[in-house]
Amino acid sequence: MASIYKFIELVGTSPNSWEEATKSAVETAAKTLRELRVAEVKELDLNIENGKVVAYRAKVKISFKYEG
C-alpha cells in the first residue's frame, strides 16, 4: 500500500538560538500531529530591537503521514 504525506510550514521562535527555534516548531507540531517524518529548515531570521537580537526565528517545513 502506498503512503501519502502532507507538508505544513511553521515558524518557531527562541530567545537563545535557531536550533531552539527549530526544536520548538517540531515539538509543538508533534503535540497534535502523528507520524512526523522530515523537518526541513527553509529560512532563518532574527528579530532586532534597539540594535540587539531579541529572538531567533526558524521557518520549518514538516511532513507527516496523511490519514485521509
Image: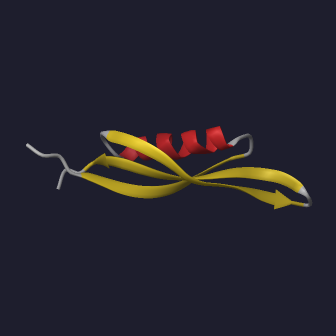
Whether residue 37 is visible here, answered yes or no, is yes
Residue in the foreground of this view, choosing between 15 and 58: 58
Q: Specify the quadrant that holds the C terminus.
A: bottom left
Q: Is residue 36 left or right of residue 61?
A: left
Task: Using the image as rendered, state which of residue 42 and residue 36 is in the foreground.
Answer: 42
In x, y percent, where is residue 55?
A: 74, 51
13 left or right of 66 in image: right
Q: Does residue 28 appear in this view?
A: no
Q: Residue furthest left?
A: 1
Q: Is residue 61 left or right of residue 55?
A: left
Q: How many marks?
A: 0
* Between 4 and 29, the one nearer to me in the picture: 4
Residue sitting at x 91%, y 58%: 51
Locate residue 30, reporting x and y percent: 41, 41
Q: Is residue 31 left or right of residue 14?
A: left
**Which colouring convention does the figure follow?**
secondary structure
Q: Quadrant of the N terminus?
A: top left
Q: Residue at x 36, y 55 (%)?
A: 7
Q: Quadrant of residue 31?
A: top left
Q: Position of residue 41 (x, y in %)?
A: 53, 48
In percent of width and height, residue 37 lies at 35, 40
